[in-house]
Image: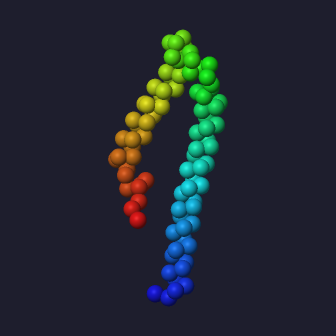
């Protein structure tokens, strides 16, 4: 192959990794905003949870577990859609 074609392939692979990293950063920011708005990072809510005074945090944890189970089953069934090998 010509050197120019090889160089373009290297650039496109590095761009793919960069885009993948940016996607995870955006998802992390959105996750942080959601956790902040739901008051899951509030020390008061965490204290209530450990004193068994409120269901709020247990509801968040339970819904996260339920949603995680559903998503994991979906990913296992549709594995080729989500995971690619290089």
The answer to whether one can see residue 55 in this image is no
Q: Quadrant of residue 81?
A: bottom left
Is 64 drawn above or below residue 80 in the view shown? above
Q: Quadrant of residue 74?
A: top left
Task: State how the image is colored.
Answer: rainbow
Across and down, in percent, residue 27 comes to 58, 46
Task: Report whether 29 appears left or right of 53.
Answer: right
Residue depicted at x 52% and y 26%? 60
Q: Residue furthest bottom?
A: 2
Residue depicted at x 53% and y 62%? 17
Residue depicted at x 52% and y 86%? 3
Across and down, in percent, residue 26 comes to 61, 48
Q: Residue furthest left?
A: 77
> Which image quadrant: the C terminus?
bottom left
Across and down, in percent, residue 66 comes to 43, 30
Residue depicted at x 62% and y 43%? 29
Task: Report whether 70 appears left or right of 5.
Answer: left
Is 83 drawn above or below residue 13 in the view shown? above
Across and down, in percent, residue 59 comes to 50, 22
The answer to whether one can see residue 9 in this image is yes
Q: How many marks?
A: 0
């Amino acid at each position: 192959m010509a050197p120019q074609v090889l160089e373009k392939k290297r650039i496109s692979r590095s761009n793919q990794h960069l885009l993948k990293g940016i996607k995870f950063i955006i998802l992390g920011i959105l996750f942080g905003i959601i956790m902040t708005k739901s008051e899951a990072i509030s020390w008061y809510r965490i204290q209530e949870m450990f004193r068994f005074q409120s269901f709020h945090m247990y509801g968040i944890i339970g819904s996260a577990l339920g949603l995680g189970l559903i998503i994991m089953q979906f990913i296992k069934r549709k594995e080729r859609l989500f995971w690619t090998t290089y």
